[in-house]
Image (spheres, grey):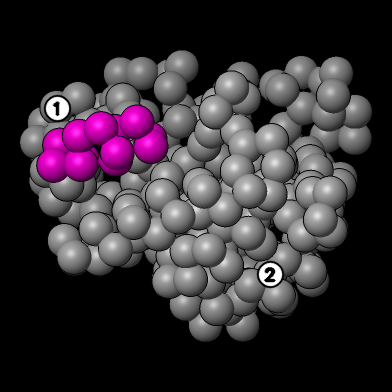
Amino acid sequence: MKTLVQLFSARDFQPWDSVLDKVQQAGFDGVEGFSANYVAPAAFRALLDERGLVMPQGHFGLDLLEGNFAEAVRAARTLGVDTVIAPYLQPADRPVDRDGWVALGRRLDLLDRKCRDEGFGFAWHNHDFEVVLLETGDTPMDVLLDTAPTMNWEADLGWILRAGANPIEWLSKRADRIVSVHLKDIQPNHETATEGGWADLGHGINEWEGIFEHLAGLPNLKAEVAEHDNPSDLTRFLGRWMSSFRRLSGH
């Protein structure tokens, strides 16, 4: 099991060598990449290697995966990525009904097969809108996982909380598909609070002990990922996350 930092959390705290120093000092195994880390992948890999950090997974946008798959593969291989994760849909690109989510699921199924042919795992990363009920009584996340039956899932528990859904229910019903989790909390007044309403793990409104019991039983979980979408202090976020993680997980 790896503890990683999603580097989107550190986008406002560059240079990257300083960010990676903080990641290492906080006790993480490595990082989860995003688009800014793929501009010069060999140079970024060197920064990781110098600090003994790894990047076993990364977020790769659908525009890149569908528009220039070969470039995504080159970056992933250079950085040592094992699992390619599609992370997000802009509002204008989100399906408006179940048929639209089925169509997206078919696109993801194709990408899943292409990634597996190249030796990578493939997963989808959720936000809040994928776990809200459709008019048909199921959710976009269910539709995507059913339509792309071998695709994995990176479950963002912070966004599940933000949607008002129950993380334990999702961890239970889709346990075999989850290969990674994003662990982050929310503030009680998250719609209007500072830092986008997010809170460091263990410093928000959520009760985490039961969730960590479920995490321990996930059969295919490979990574537990620290994320905060808008931290004002990177060192505080990394330190608090790791302290809470060790207390809650018993590691």
- Tell me which residue sits at (24%, 53%) in the image: 81
Left or right: where 158 falls relative to 43: right
> Could you say where residue 154 lies in the image, as x and y percent from the top left?
52, 57
- Tell me which residue sits at (34%, 46%) in the image: 58
Left or right: where 223 falls relative to 240: left
Q: In front here: 10 or 36?
A: 36
Q: Which residue is mark 2?
A: 171
C-alpha gap between disc 1 and disc 2: 36 Å
Q: Which residue is mark 1?
A: 40
- Tell me which residue sits at (85%, 18%) in the image: 192
Residue extending furthest right?
Answer: 189
- Tell me which residue sits at (29%, 63%) in the image: 113
Left or right: where 217 falls relative to 70: right
Residue range in magenta is 61-72
Q: Which element is circle 2 on? A: helix
* Kind of residue at badge 2: Leu
Q: Which element is circle 1 on? A: loop
* Kind of residue at badge 1: Ala
> Could you say where residue 21 lies in the image, as x and y percent from the top left?
32, 35
Which is more N-terminal, label 2 or label 1?
1
Give the quarter of the image for residue 7.
top left
The image quadrant where one finds the N terminus is: bottom left
Give the quarter of the image for residue 38.
top left
The answer to whether residue 22 of the structure is visible from this angle is no
